[in-house]
Image (tube, rainbow, N blue to C red):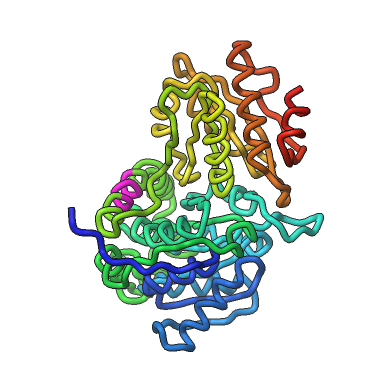
Amino acid sequence: MTAAAPVQRQALTGNKAAAHALKLARIQVLCYFPIGPSDEVGEELSRMIQRGEFSAKLIELEHERSVMNAQITATQAGARCSFATNSEGLLIAAQQLIFASYARIPIVVVVAHRALEPPAVVRTDDQDTIMYRDIHWMHYHCENAQDVLDTLIQAYRVSEDPSVLLPAFVTYDGWEVSHNSYPVQLPSQEAVDRFLPPFQLPPEVDFVKNLDFAAYYGGPRMSGYGYIDVDREYMERRYQLDQALNVTAKQVVKKARQEYLDLVGRGYGGLIEPYKLEDAQVVIVAMGSLAATSRFAVDLLRQQGRPVGLVKIRTFRPFPSEDLLEALKEVKAAVVLDRNPVAAVYQDLRSSLFGQRQAPLVLGRVVGLGGRDVTYYNVMYLAEEALAAVRKGHVAEPLAWHFEVIEDEEMLTQALG
């Protein structure tokens, strides 16, 4: 293990932490179209470029579809790229997002979540990336600005690994994380350079430097884009894509986290983060800033003698099935907090537990859509609901929507009856 590299401490919003991470990652091309609450990332990077703090090409375009096209082309030419968007911006770029993963293009996109319209709300939930759970992008969910910075740097390392070569969303809650300030430790540029080498695509993927255009667009039985013999290789390529995401990437994420920890001396990372699982009967499962709220609730519940713990899911894709099974093997019930209308984490956890002996009871609760507050009292209420299910030996309502905002102890007492 090497000695930890020196760090600089600043107060940064989630968006500004993302900008600093992209600067430290030495991105070469920044494509930009503004959409709140993500637009501050591009604005901050633009100011850094104007001040001469680092060198990158800034390209302003007319919409996110053009942005993704430019990102794809630049990455295929061997440039490290990024941009920040959310919600309707991701919808406009849908076809290009699928092209990026199926063509194995390791773009990293910053997403400060924003709820989809209609009705029009400029607040947060996870559905703008959850809706892309099945197109073989990696999905990282961050709880605060430090998490954003650490995760973005590691995401490039993972996505650009020749055994992975997948695009990634690095996400966090709009407004709650994007515009709130947190204490952030910035690793030195030298440390990040040691962790993240210059970007270089494998020759077979490099679109410009190593491509015979005559062969690319010609030849017998080629697809419209000329990559492969469709009948012979299409299914095999999809299998390789799936293995890269759901097998290889899991190990690369863990390895990158350990190397980052060894170099910097601290850092968020990995697939999951267990918290106070020893002797826990009930475990809260959450992503993003809900994990921070849940951690505080767990501390309060522990003070009251309640055997409750937390598992924070960091990567929704790849879904950390094996790690969750290990974390929950002694647990009697899990309550899953989903900030999306399809209960995506609940459904995936239920699938992971299928066929397991003595699997825990699972309660799925949809919460916080459209930016509705989820307080630590809400989390305490849901934990008590799970503890009651353990005492009864069954779950009366496995999946439900939790609408009420519980603001204080009096409301909590009334809700618990």
Going by the image, does 141 lie left or right of 415?
left
Relative to 277, say whether 66 is above or below: below
* Residue at the (54%, 22%) spot, across then down: 333
Residue 303: x percent and y percent? 53, 30
Going by the image, does 404 lie left or right of 71?
right
Q: Is residue 252 magenta?
A: yes
Q: Which segment is the magenta one?
A: 251-257
Going by the image, does 22 lie left or right of 374?
left
Total marks drawn? 0
User: Which residue is outermost to the top?
Assistant: 392
Q: Nearer the viewer, residue 56 or 98?
A: 56
Residue 410: x percent and y percent? 76, 33
* Residue at the (46%, 51%) spot, across then down: 138
Relative to 353, say whether 394 is above or below: above
Q: Is residue 309 visible?
A: yes
Q: Is residue 349 magenta?
A: no
Q: Is residue 207 visible?
A: no
Q: Nearer the viewer, residue 223 or 335?
A: 335
Residue 177: x percent and y percent? 58, 58
* Residue at the (52%, 40%) spot, across then down: 295
Give the main secondary structure of the magenta stretch: helix
* Residue at the (52%, 29%) spot, across then down: 302
Relative to 120, say whether 386 is above or below: above
Choose top left, top right, bottom left or bottom right for residue 103.
bottom left
Choose top left, top right, bottom left or bottom right for residue 321.
top left
Residue 326: x percent and y percent? 39, 28
User: Which residue is outermost to the left?
Assistant: 1
Going by the image, does 191 lie left or right of 77?
left
Image quadrant occupied by the C terminus? top right
